[in-house]
Image: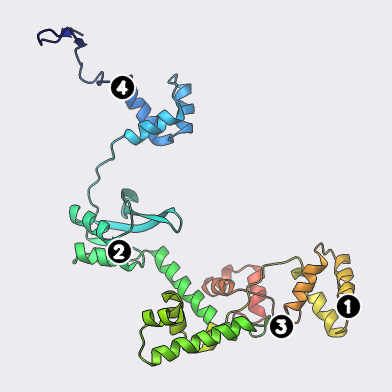
Amino acid sequence: MRRLVCATAGCRRTFREQIPGLLRRYQRRTVRLATQVAAVVKELAGRAAARTLQVMAIPLTRFTALRLLLALPLPLAAAPRVLGVDDFALRKSTSYATILINVETNQRIDVLPDRKAETLTAWLRAHPGVEIVCRDGSTTYAQAIRAALPDAVQVSDRWHLWNGLGEAVRKEVGAHSSCWAKHGPPLQDGKPATTTLQRWRQVHDLIDAGVGLLESARRLHLSLNTVKRYARASEPERMRRAPQYRPTLVDPYRDHLRTRRAEEPAVPVQTLLTEIKELGYTGSQNLLYRYINQGRVEADRPTISAKRVTRLLLSNPDKLSEVPSRFRTVGYIS
C-alpha cells in the first residue's frame, strides 16, 4: 500500500491507499472477516453468535453481534404472485405490525410498522405484480387491497377459515347455553341475570325507536361493542351464559356425593368430607362447601364450558378421547 500526502498547501496529513475488497474506511475488521461475522450473527443473533465466534477465535460481545446484525442490509425481494398478509403483536393490546409473506415459498417479504390501511396500500402500489392476496378477516386489509389492487383476488387460508368457524360456533354455542346446559349447574341468576335482561330491553327499545347503535351506546353509557352484542341477540335468553367453573379436586368424587345426598338429603357436609377423604380427597372443607353451594353435585350432567362444547362439535368423533366421549354419552353431543 502506498502512503499518500495531502496536496493542499500547508497540510502535511497523510493517509493510506485503499485496496478494494480488503478494507473499508474507519473499520477495525477486514472485509473478509466482517463477512464471516455477518454470516454467523445472521443465523444465531446475540449470545449464541458471541459464543460461536469465541470458538472461531473472533472474540465479540453479544452487543457487538447485535449491532452488526442490525447493520446488515435488508434483502430486496420482488413482489410475489401470491402474497400473504397478517398482523402480529409487538406488544399485546398496545402495538401491532403487519408481516408480508410469499405464500408459494413461505418466505418473509417485508414487515410493515403498523396495521393501517394506508401503510399496506402504499406498499402494494410500490410493489406491483401481486395477483392473489391471502389475508385474515380484517376489513382494514380488505380496504387497502381494494384500493391498491382492485383486480387482485382476495382469499383466506385454511387456518383463518377454521379459526373463524370456531369463533362463530363458540358464540352460537354460548348463545344457546339455556338449551345445552339446562341439565347442568344452574345458569347465571340473581343480579347479573337481571342486569342483562334490563340492558337487552333498553338496547332493543332504542333500536325499535330508530336510534342508531352509536347513539344507543352514548345514552346507555355502554361501549359500542357491548351494544352490538345485545342488538344481535334476538331474545334475552341468548344472553344467558353457562357458569364457567374450573376443574377442582372435588370433581372425581361427584358421583359419590350425588349418591349420598340422594340417599340422605340432610347428610352433614363434614360427614361427606370424611367419606371422600377416605377415598383420596386432598382438598379443603371450604372447597367442598363451594362445590355443593354452586349446585354442581345435583346437576344431571358434569360441568362443561361453551369452549369445550365447541371443541366437541368441531372434532372428528373417531378422534375423541374417553373424557369427551363421556360428555357425548350424557347428552351434550348427540
The quadrant of the image that shows the N terminus is top left
Decide if residue 174 is in sight here: yes
- Please name the residue that numbered disc 1 is placed on: 268
Q: Earlier in the sequence, mark 1 or mark 4?
A: 4
Give the quarter of the image for residue 224: bottom left
- Amino acid type shown at disc 3: Asp
Mark 4 or mark 3: whose residue is earlier in sequence = 4
Label number found at residue 141? 2
The kind of residue tagged 4 is Arg
Q: Do the residues labelled 4 and 3 touch (CB within 8 Å)?
A: no
> Separation of disc 1 and disc 2 at Cα?
62 Å
Quadrant in which the C terminus is drawn: bottom right
Dividing the picture into quarters, in which one does residue 213 lie?
bottom left
Front residue (pair 156, 96): 96
Would you name the residue on which mark 3 appears? 300
Q: Earlier in the sequence, mark 3 or mark 1?
A: 1
Q: Earlier in the sequence, mark 2 or mark 3?
A: 2
Q: How many labels does the image show?
A: 4
Q: Write down the residue under mark 4.
A: 32
Q: Is residue 254 left or right of residue 325?
A: right
Contact between marks 3 and 1 (CB within 8 A): the answer is no
Secondary structure of the residue carrying tag 3 is: loop
Query: The residue tagged with tag 1: helix, strand or loop?
Result: loop
Give the class, few, some or many, for how many residues have Cα within 10 Å of label 1's Cα (few <14, many ≥20).
few
Foreground residue among 72 and 6: 6
Give the amino acid type for the residue marked by disc 1 in the picture.
Answer: Pro
**Distance Cα–Cα, label 4 vs label 3:** 75 Å
**Point 47% across, 71% down: residue:** 167
